[in-house]
Image (cartoon, rainbow, N blue to C red):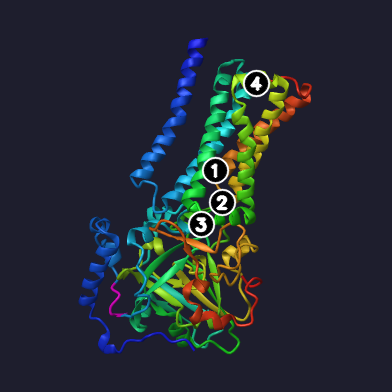
Amino acid sequence: MYRYPRPPSSEITPRHVFEQRRSLMKGMAAGMALGSLGSSPALMARELGSVTDTDFGQDLSPTPLEAIRGYSNFYEFGTAKEDPRQHAHQLRTDPWSVRVEGLVDKPGTFALEDLISRFQLEERIYRLRCVEAWSMVIPWIGFELRQLLKAVQPTSEARFVVFETLHDPEQMPGQKKDLLDWPYREGLRLDEAMHPLTLMAVGLYGDTLPKENGAPIRLVVPWKYGFKSIKSVVRIRLQKEQPTSSWQAVQPEEYGFYANVNPNVKHPRWHQATERRVGETGRRKTLMFNGYESEVADLYKGMDLEKHF
Amino acid sequence: MPQLTGILRLTGLIAGTVPLVALAWAWESGQLGFMASEALIHWLGNLGLGALLLTLTLSPLSRLTGSHLPLALRRQAGLWAFVYLALHALAWSFLDMGGDATLIRSELAEQRHLQLGLLCLVLLMPLALTSFRQAREWMGLLHWLRLHRLVYAAAIGGVIHQAMVQKVLEWPTFLSASVLAVLLVYRVAGALRSRPGSPET
């Protein structure tokens, strides 16, 4: 059974201390570039309240915020890496709610504010490995998805969890192009979704999520390729059948349902044994399950990972 | 019109140099984004393929306009294409692969788009080496023309390589594929009308 350090409540940092520490870290991590950025009113519109400052990933040095915001795949706003930063301002994140439905005893529509106040937010510094062989380290803020799933009480029939991004071509101009079968869909096996590492993120770097990073709420599954971590989620559905994710539908031979980070399983387009960490020169070795092997390997015991890629 | 061709060739020299200088400046000043090497590699590849396709349009352009002027640029455009594509391959080897020979070998062994890209570059090498007038005279025009038809194979391979690299097909591929398709139709139609192997100028 996987465990990670959970600090006693006496160690939970008061918000003002946390913010001071965060801004100090931001300054160190991103240098002076951040000074000119400041905190935009849009980012500060929604308060995150108290955030537990876990020790998770403290050994990793986070990628500068500017790089996280300026280099991302979010095809709803265009296919170039800088497109989301340029176009995501069109997204309206307030009000926002998430519909949870399907094979659950207590389906419901949850306002974002209610999710934030109801579940304990934590900071988790995770590696993010894109299938395109680049990676980052991101200090997320979020709650464990399993908390939400427990609240809606999955029935005994439920096996898979399906997520959907907002579908509104007016706000997300990339959806006017026929690149993917919109809305973007992703799925997890229920046990993957219930894993303590699986996060619903509502912030990063001590603040609410930038729109280009999937505001106001997104999935983060750190041991899977980045495309599994679906952004701007409006719907979560529990079902019996294994779903087909968006990329899997386009290129089933390239993008599998599991999409676990695995340096030993080859991809026809990108080299998966090593990766380039954004902001670094040279390459790093890609770690099995993106470095979370001891935590998640049990989920795939006995499975042929070449076949279930 | 020797003066006009001279001006045209000088213009070609400037047109080929400016993007390189701009890329070098963008690289130095951090204008290429958070993954500068990737951006540089894509720019060099797209510009190189663009120059290659431009090279192929010059001779049909000359026929259609009845002017010899476009031909004055043909060798230069072809050499620029080779320069950009060779830099593209070098940038990939040293910036993306970090100059790691083992890694480069294993990548080339596995990735089809890399094999194709390398093949196209290799095809262009004898063309670049024999692009000078002395080589053409030494080889004889007929052999020279036959050899230089390889440029079509390289262009077709290059467009396929470009398409394979993209996760979803987008305008660079649509643009280069359309240009190539028009050129091929023009060439095939021309070959059907005249005897194959006849000198084309």
Quarter of the rendering occupied by the C terminus of chain B: top right
Please state the horizontal and vertical placement of residue A199, each as a whole percent of the image.
Answer: 43, 77
Residue hosting label 1: B172
The x and y percentages for residue A23 are: 24, 68
For marks 1 and 4 on the same chain, the one whose residue lies earlier in the sequence:
4
Q: Main secondary structure of the magenta part?
A: loop
Residue A280 in the image: above or below residue B201: below
**What is the chain letter for disc 1?**
B
For the residues carrying marks 4 and 2, which lies nearer the camera in this image? 4
Q: Which quarter of the figure has residue A87?
A: bottom left
Q: Is residue A262 visible?
A: yes
The reply, left or right, for residue A95 in relation to residue A134 is left
The residue that label 4 is drawn on is B136
Residue B49 occupies quadrant: top right
Distance (Cα) linking label 1 and label 4: 34 Å
As displayed, is residue A144 above or below residue A179? below
Residue at mark 3: A175
Callout 2 crowding tier (Cα within 10 Å): few <14, some 14–19, many ≥20: few
Q: Which of marks 1 and 4 is in front?
A: 4
Displayed quadrant of residue A4:
bottom left
* Magenta-colored span: A47-52
Q: Do labels 3 and 4 share a chain?
A: no
Query: Mark 3 and 4 residues: CB-CB less than 8 Å, in contact?
Result: no
The answer to whether the residues at label 2 and label 1 have Cβ atoms under 8 Å apart is yes
- In the rendered image, residues at marks 2 and 1 fall on the same chain: yes
What chain is tagged by disc 3?
A
Which amino acid, by three-letter code, is at mark 4?
A: Arg
What secondary structure is marked by label 4?
helix
Mark 1 to mark 3 CA distance (whole Å): 20 Å
**Type of the residue with mark 2:** Gln
Disc 2 marks which residue? B166
Give the mark toward the camera: 2 or 3.
2
